[in-house]
Amino acid sequence: MGEHVEYEKVGSDYLERRRLKRGAAGWVLLAGLGVSYVISGDFAGWNFGLAQGGWGGLLIATALMATMYAGMVFGLAELAAALPVAGAGYGFARRALGPLGGFATGVAILVEYAIAPAAISVFIGGYVEALGLFGLANSWPVHLVCFAVFVGVHLYGVGEALRLMFAITAVAVVALLAFVVGMIPKFDADKLFDLAGGDGFLPFGFTGALGALVYAIWFFLAVEGVPLAAEEARDPRRDVPRGIVAALAVLLLFAGAILVLAPGGAGSEALRASDNPLPDAVRAAYGGDNALARVVGHVGLAGLVASFFSIIFAYSRQLFALSRAGYLPRWLSRTGRRGTPHWALVVPGVIGFALAALTRDGARLINIAVFGAALSYVLMMVSHIVLRIREPGLERPYRTPGGVVTTGVALVLAVAAVVATFVVDELAAGVTAGILAVALAHFWFHSRRHLVAAAPEERFAADERARREAG
């Protein structure tokens, strides 16, 4: 895109005051980060797709979203290895689509990651109330503790945060494995299709399957955030592709197992509106409360905490990168002596707490996040295709299997996800569109005249521009 931008001079110590801690994570921690982003979606949320499309509709939707995420992950693995920067999706789109396209992608990603923790903290609060913990009648103290404690851990250090995140995620994975093993003996294929008011494999037709796309996304939402850790990885060109692909493999296995065994053991009708579908599935399958239901129920809280904890990391790195390059106020990208972007952690945390405490509407908040995510998927897949065509000689330590065909399929499915999100929740789509409009107005009237050429994402774009002008 040909929009004109201007760069301001900055002091020689500008980047020194905006330096992340390098070498903090290898591919195993990155894979754990990818699973951690998503794992709360295995414990809750996906099951609302049963009410939208029936089991058959949700199965089709999940297969389509699994295909989309697989294509996107392979494309992002290539882009992250070629352009290993903290800006990730914003950095890729900046090089492919110019500053406006890059900033739009970054804002869409930021909407996803800044809103999702607010939604998850609402779910955590509801979980705490449902379990009768601490005798709470209102969830706002839970929201406050969540943001204060886990933002605080991230402020302490990225290595410590990633290791704690990995441990919490491991606990949640063990609970999912216990659920899968416990539900196998109770599987009955007829229960998949017992939805009241529906009949057959597609009780609400293909329209229902389209609406179920929004809930099928919950099995995979946010795994694309692994490349945001590129500047903190030991060997980003090698570790980021391995980490994100390994994370997706784990998520695909759990999505398939849960989609079949939960409604296949309990019945789709029993889970269509459940806030805690896994423990409810165990109770329905076994005819009452038992030890497995209690374990899965309590450890489900660990799954929510893991996703909440990890997405704080994601929003801070995306905000850090946009701020460092001058698209957003530069003070937001300053890092402390431990190499963590303190303002980029704290400011969205305060906003997230306010949203959770004031709205207490986790479903609406997560739909806003999903709409931002789907928009970013479209732009990132376009970026992969553009760079493959325009820069065939770009060094690519990892190459996407299938090339642009793979990301082209992901692009088509991402567009379908955008449409589905709009159909399911017009208000959420409108809120996201409003945020994007305000952000793009800020870019057009202010920040495009105050960018920082020294930022890594801008340097990558300048290198490509110089190459084209020379050749």
Image: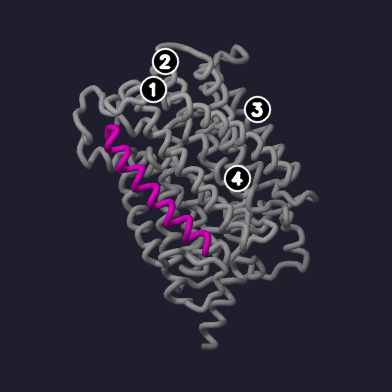
Residue 278 lies, in percent from the top left, at 45, 25
Mark toward the start of the polypeptide (4 vs 3) = 4
In the image, what residue type sits under mark 3? Answer: Val
Given the image, on which type of amino acid does mark 1 rest?
A: Lys
- Residue 192's place in the image compared with 446, above or below, is above
**What crowding class fits label 4: few (fewer than 14 Cα within 10 Å), some (14-19), or many (20 or more)?**
many
Question: Distance from label 1 to label 4 (Cα)?
Answer: 32 Å
State the separation of the CA atoms marked 4 and 3.
22 Å
Question: Dot 3 corresponds to which residue?
Answer: 145
Indicate yes or no whether the magenta region holds residue 58.
yes
Quarter holding the N terminus is bottom left
Using the numbered discs, state the Cα–Cα distance from disc 1 to disc 3 in whole angstroms: 39 Å
> From the viewer's perspective, is the residue at label 1 or at label 4 nearer?
1
Mark 3 packing: few (<14 Cα in 10 Å), some, or many (20+)? Answer: few
User: In the image, is residue 123 above or below residue 33?
Assistant: above
Question: Residue 248 versus residue 445: which sits nearer the camera?
Answer: 248
Q: What residue is disc 2 on?
A: 286
CA gap, disc 1 to disc 2?
A: 8 Å
Disc 4: which residue: 33
SS category of the residue bearing label 3: helix
